[in-house]
Image (cartoon, rainbow, N blue to C red):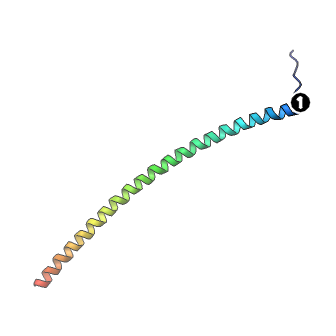
C-alpha cells in the first residue's frame, strides 16, 4: 500500500487554488462563448431591422410622392374647372 505524501498546508492551498482557478477559467470561457454568440445574433437582428426601416422609408416616400401628385392633379382640375 503506497504511503501518502505529507503535504504542508501552503502546498495544499496552492494546489487547491490552482484547481479553483482552472475551474473559474473554464466557466469564464463558456460565458464568453455565450456572450459572443448573443452579440452576433444581436448584430444580425440590428442589420435586419435597418433593412426593414429602409424599406419602410422607401414606401413612405412613394406614398408622399403619390399623395403630392394626386393633390396637384386635383388642384389643377379645380383651378381650371
Residue shown at 61%/43% (left/top)? 31
Residue furthest top as drawn:
1
Residue shown at 23%/73% (left/top)? 68
66 shown above or below 14: below
For the N terminus, which image quadrant? top right
Q: Position of residue 53 (x, y in %)?
A: 37, 60
In the rendered image, which residue does mark 1 sit on? 8
The local crowd at label 1, few if under 14, some if 14 to 19, many if 20 or more residues have their Cα within 10 Å, is: few
Q: Nearer the viewer, residue 17 or 42?
A: 17
60 shown above or below 24: below
In the rendered view, does 43 fall on the left or right side of 33? left
Residue furthest left as drawn:
81
Residue shown at 74%/37% (left/top)? 20
Q: Position of residue 76 (x, y in %)?
A: 14, 80
For the C terminus, which image quadrant? bottom left
Total marks drawn?
1
In the rendered view, does 77 fall on the left or right side of 49? left
In the rendered view, does 63 fall on the left or right side of 52? left
| Quarter location, residue 63 | bottom left
Residue shown at 20%/72% (left/top)? 69
In the rendered view, does 10 fall on the left or right side of 73? right
7 shown above or below 3: below
Mark 1 falls on what kind of element?
loop
Q: Position of residue 47 (x, y in %)?
A: 42, 52
Q: Nearer the viewer, residue 8 or 49?
A: 8
Amino acid at each position: 500500500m503506497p504511503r501518502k505524501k505529507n503535504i504542508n498546508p501552503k502546498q495544499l492551498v496552492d494546489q487547491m487554488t490552482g484547481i479553483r482557478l482552472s475551474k473559474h477559467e473554464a466557466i469564464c470561457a463558456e460565458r464568453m462563448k455565450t456572450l459572443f454568440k448573443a452579440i452576433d445574433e444581436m448584430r444580425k437582428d440590428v442589420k435586419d431591422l435597418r433593412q426593414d426601416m429602409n424599406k419602410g422609408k422607401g414606401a413612405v416616400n412613394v406614398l408622399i410622392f403619390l399623395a403630392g401628385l394626386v393633390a396637384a392633379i386635383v388642384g389643377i382640375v379645380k383651378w381650371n374647372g
